[in-house]
Image (cartoon, rainbow, N blue to C red):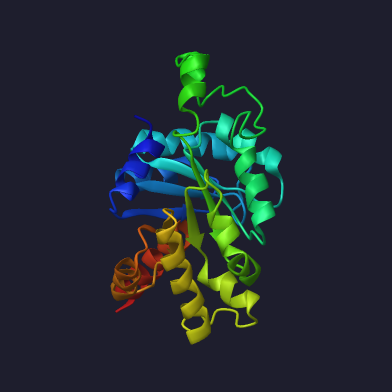
Amino acid sequence: MSKAEILKQKLVADESVYGTNVLLPEAATCELMGKAGCDFVWIDMEHGAIDYKDAYYQVIAAHAGGAAAIIRVPGNNPDMMKKVLDMGADGVIYPLVRSAEEARNIIEACLYPPKGFRGYNPYAASNYGAICEEAYCANAQNSILRIIMLEHVDAYRDLDAILAIEELDGLMLGPSDFSGSLNKLLQRNDPEVTAMLLDTVRRARAAGKFVGIALGCNTPAEKFRYWRDMGVRMFSFGQDVDFLYAAIAAKKQELMK
């Protein structure tokens, strides 16, 4: 069973899964996060200093650590989905989706014909040929998590059509950018922002899609429990640079006392 299938199995069983974001182009960080108990590592090509080669080694490292490797791709480029899936990513997160049409195009980029238009050459995803072509193709749809970021009010307005996309696995809430799309950047606890995000969770779960959320490493545990109680099941808690900075700064302050 692939790591994506293990995550899906947990999410279908209404269990929570946890992971962290990686922005630094260092493979060992991904292995370390897996060893530390993360269910998944979110390799961030949108904001991080990470190129294709970095991401390839980070996928290998995440797997070595025991975590699923999920890549957030940058920009509106469906061809990028093919590259990251062929290198063995267990899932993709697509940012700043604005419409059902855009979401459908992205999902189809993850699927082989007749459901999509992904080109065929899963060199690493097929364990370098250890999985035969027929077996890989038969299970390709189940071995990948297809997630879009719900971080713009336009997507919220088109939510029913987005949730109607059968092969979409789940949504990841991005409170920071979502608040920004309402001209309330970083006002994550604003009542309007919260109400829309909670409505998204409710409607997504009713449609059979899981929901995740990205929260910072300084977010108190009560906030995670709040979102878990509301139905969120996939949690990204902070990122490598923040954890590293916080640990170093705290240690220096301790030593200076």
Q: Position of residue 256 (x, y in %)?
A: 33, 76
Q: Is residue 105 left or right of residue 143?
A: right
| Whether residue 59 is visible | yes
In this picture, is 81 found above or below 254? Answer: above
Which residue is rendered at x = 60% and y = 29% of the image? 112
Which residue is rendered at x = 52% and y = 84% of the image? 192
Q: Position of residue 211 (x, y in %)?
A: 43, 59
In this picture, is 143 found above or below 225? Answer: above
Q: Quadrant of residue 120?
A: top right
Is 59 in front, or is 245?
59
In this picture, is 151 found above or below 62? Answer: below
Q: Is residue 13 left or right of residue 109?
A: left
Q: Is residue 157 left or right of residue 212?
A: right
Label total for image = 0
Is 136 in front, or is 60?
136
Which residue is rendered at x = 33% and y = 69% of the image? 224
Is 255 in front, or is 97?
97
Is 51 in front, or is 252?
51
| Whether residue 126 is visible | no
Q: Position of residue 174 (x, y in %)?
A: 52, 66
Residue farthest to the bottom, as pictured? 191
Which residue is rendered at x = 53% and y = 56% of the image? 163
Quarter holding the C terminus? bottom left
Q: Is residue 10 left or right of residue 120?
A: left
Q: Position of residue 117 (x, y in %)?
A: 67, 33
Quarter holding the N terminus? top left
